[in-house]
Image: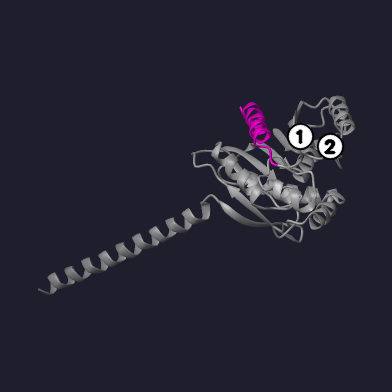
Amino acid sequence: MKIKLLYAFLLGMFAVACTSTQNEETSEEAETAEEVAAPAGEVTYSADSTTLKGYFAVSESDGKKPGVLVIHEWWGHNEHSRERADMLAELGYVAFALDMYGDGKNTNHPDDAGKFMTAVVSNMDLAKARFESALEQLKNHPNVDSEKIGVVGYCFGGTMALSMANAGYDLDGVAAFHAGLGLPIMPEGEGSVKAKVLVANGAEDPWVSEQQVADFKAVMDGAGVDYTYVSYEGAKHAFTNKGADALGEEFGLPLAYNAEADSASWEEMKVLFSEVFK
């Protein structure tokens, strides 16, 4: 009887030990899964001492895929850039809507937007640091093929995207929508721009003169850049932003959404990325 009781006791202890071990393994597996979970949604990162707030939109398809940075308009990191990130994810990419102003700040007033933008454009070392930090975030995403990177930018963001391409960053494709062409960074010389470039602007955008377009093309041609410049008839500035009409009317600015130009330029971007990400 004593032997049977001892045997039963040992079996009980063994069962408890096994259960404890299984629980620990399950806990460890859960922690590991949490550690490697692909980030999506809002993330906080930094450049030097500045806190930045970005937004990841992740494709549901499996495996490594190209990554695309989204640079916001002069209004700041807002729903427009996040919406574009979501649209890129639907195409099968991992998109990261970055923050060039810090703390994810944005505005609906042009005076504030102008101040935010000027602070960045007047300090390109600062702009580069924030771009590089976002680029690192994107490349380190577990679902991103770090050898396949694109950038899209809108308004101020388009100017920044073109400037970063001109700075010689290792990018595959850059698409700039209703971008200003007074670029703070120009190509250093032939072969210095690695990316294939698309510029999609409105023909009725008074902030982009015919002379600016001619000068831009001359510089790109002189540097041997592989680029396409498309001008959409009837399109004004901010033609991809559905909130542009209201802002234009409120502040007397030449802003207007143009569904046809928005759709056509998006298709041009899709062609660009399909070519460079082969």
Residue at the image point whose x is 28% and y is 67% from the top: 16
> The residue under label 2 is which amino acid type?
Val
Residue at the image point whose x is 58% and y is 39% from the top: 93
Count every numbered label the image shows and give the total: 2
For residue 238, above or below residue 227: below
Residue 208 numbered mark, or none: 2
- x and y percent of residue 243 in the render? 67, 48
Asked whether the beta carbons under mark 1 and mark 2 sit within 8 Å of each other, the answer is yes
Residue at the image point whose x is 58% and y is 47% from the top: 57
- x and y percent of residue 46 in the render? 71, 57
- The stretch in magenta equals 257-278
Q: Quadrant of residue 18 in the image?
A: bottom left
Closer to the camera in the image, 141 or 166:
166
Which residue carries the number 1 mark?
201
> The residue under label 1 is which amino acid type?
Asn
For residue 100, above or below residue 232: below
- x and y percent of residue 192 in the render? 82, 31
Residue 171 seen anywhere in this rendered image of the structure: no
For residue 99, above or below residue 3: above
Residue 259 seen anywhere in this rendered image of the structure: yes
User: What is the CA distance from the residue labelled 1 to the residue labelled 2?
Assistant: 8 Å
Quadrant containing the N terminus is bottom left
Rendering colour mode? one colour
34 vs 86, left or right, is left
Sort mark 1 into few (<14), some (14-19) or many (20+) by Cα contacts within 10 Å: many
**Element marked by disc 1:** strand
Quadrant containing the C terminus is top right
